[in-house]
Each structure stands twice: as structure tokens, then as C-alpha cells.
Image (cartoon, helix red, strand yellow):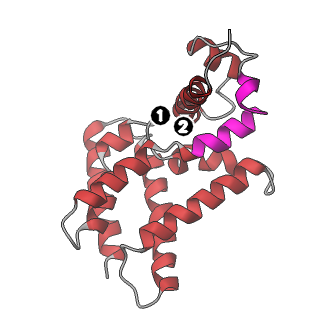
């Protein structure tokens, strides 16, 4: 039986959404294609109708960033001039910290991707997406030049993703909350001048 083209597109989106969450929560090495497809009630062989390899899926999954959508919403809903604070507060929130699967791929996958060869397609794609997102963040940061704003944005993004990674290791909930509270204040004070 032939399915309409829309069905194939929807199936591909389902695979990417599910894989993105798994990659962030389990890493790419901890995500098996056979298990992913079985859980989606699809065949393992059907995977190759959509993707040439697991790495192709990983690259596409970088674009499926639920946290990026949450940040855009927070910025959109912020009062004028409050976009940077909304961005930092949302990124370093307890909710984001607790949602590894739906969280930022930078915090979840950077250390794993750093172990890949510098010219790997996944690493290059990840770096491109990180650069694009950092440039967008820079638009909300004060600075005399575009270069100064982008330098601050790179430090903010790398600092916040590292902070989130460490916060996820803290087992005491009160200590974790205090750590995130202090980090939000630190990063806002650091980049808002």
C-alpha cells in the first residue's frame, strides 16, 4: 500500500522529534535506531527510507530544539528591554534543568560531540547551529560593537550550558535551586553592562 507524501513527511518528523529527545537524554551512543523505531511502531528498515545514517538523523535532530522555542517565546513575551533577563531566567530555570530530553542540545551533547573528529559532519553541523543561536542571543546584549556583543554571547552561552550541566548533577534540590538562582544573577550582571 502506498502512503501519500504527507504521511512520509509526518513519519520523518515523528522520528526526528523522538530521536532529538533521546539523543539529549541518552547521548547518541546510548540511542539505538532499532529501539527508537520499535518504540515508534516502525520498522528498523523503514529508518533508511528517511535517513542515510544515524549521523544524518543526529544532525537533523539538532534543529529540533524545544528549548530554543521556549526561549523565543520568553523573549517575545518579555517587556521591552527585558529580553536578556527573560532569556537567562528561562535557560537557567529549574524546569529546564529537570527536562534533559526537552532541553538545550548544547548542555546535553557538547561533551560527547567534542570527542568526535573535528571534521565530523555532526560536529560541524552542531558548531554551525551554535554559532547561529549565539548570534541571535547577541542582539539582546549591550555592547559598543557587534563583535563585543557576540563575544559576550559566546561566553554567556558556554557559561550557561556548563552551569546547567553541573546543576543537573547536584542531587539536593535546594542546593540545585540556589545554584541556579546565583547563576542567573551572575550571568545577567556580567553581560548586561
The quadrant holding residue 129 is bottom right
Q: From the viewer's perspective, tell me whether residue 69 is left or right of residue 74.
A: right
Q: Which residue reaches farthest bottom?
A: 144
Q: Position of residue 108 (x, y in %)?
A: 53, 43
Q: Is 172 placed above or below 163 here?
A: above
Q: What kind of element bears circle 2?
A: helix
Q: Nearer the viewer, residue 168 or 96?
A: 96
Q: Which mark is residue 23?
A: none
Q: Main secondary structure of the magenta part?
A: helix
Circles 1 and 2: CB atoms closer than 8 Å: yes
Residue receiving disc 2: 24
- The magenta-colored residue range is 47-62
Quadrant containing the C terminus in the rendered view: bottom left
Q: Evaluate whether residue 182 shows in this view.
A: no
Q: What kind of element bears circle 1?
A: loop
Residue receiving disc 1: 101
The quadrant holding residue 124 is bottom right
Q: Residue at x 21, y 71 (%)?
A: 80
Q: Position of residue 137 (x, y in %)?
A: 43, 67
Quadrant containing the N terminus in the rendered view: top right
Please count the marks in the image: 2
Is residue 56 within the magenta segment? yes
Q: Residue at x 46, y 89 (%)?
A: 145
Amino acid at each position: 500500500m502506498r502512503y501519500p507524501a504527507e504521511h512520509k513527511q509526518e513519519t520523518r518528523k515523528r522520528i526526528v522529534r523522538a530521536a532529538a529527545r533521546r539523543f539529549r537524554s541518552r547521548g547518541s551512543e546510548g540511542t539505538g535506531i532499532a529501539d527508537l523505531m520499535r518504540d515508534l511502531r516502525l520498522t528498523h528498515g523503514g529508518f533508511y527510507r528517511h535517513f542515510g545514517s544515524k549521523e544524518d538523523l543526529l544532525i537533523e535532530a539538532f534543529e529540533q530544539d524545544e528549548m530554543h522555542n521556549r526561549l523565543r517565546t520568553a523573549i517575545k513575551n518579555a517587556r521591552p528591554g527585558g529580553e536578556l533577563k527573560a532569556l537567562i531566567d528561562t535557560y537557567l530555570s529549574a524546569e529546564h534543568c529537570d527536562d534533559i530530553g526537552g532541553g538545550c542540545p548544547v548542555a546535553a551533547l557538547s561533551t560527547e560531540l567534542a570527542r568526535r573528529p573535528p571534521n565530523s559532519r555532526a560536529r560541524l553541523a552542531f558548531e554551525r547551529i551554535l554559532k547561529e543561536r549565539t548570534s541571535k542571543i547577541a542582539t539582546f546584549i549591550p555592547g559598543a560593537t557587534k563583535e563585543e556583543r557576540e563575544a559576550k554571547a559566546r561566553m554567556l552561552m558556554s557559561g550557561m550550558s556548563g552551569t546547567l550541566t553541573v546543576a543537573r548533577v547536584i542531587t539536593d534540590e535546594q542546593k540545585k535551586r540556589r545554584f541556579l538562582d546565583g547563576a542567573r544573577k551572575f550571568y545577567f550582571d556580567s553581560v548586561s553592562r
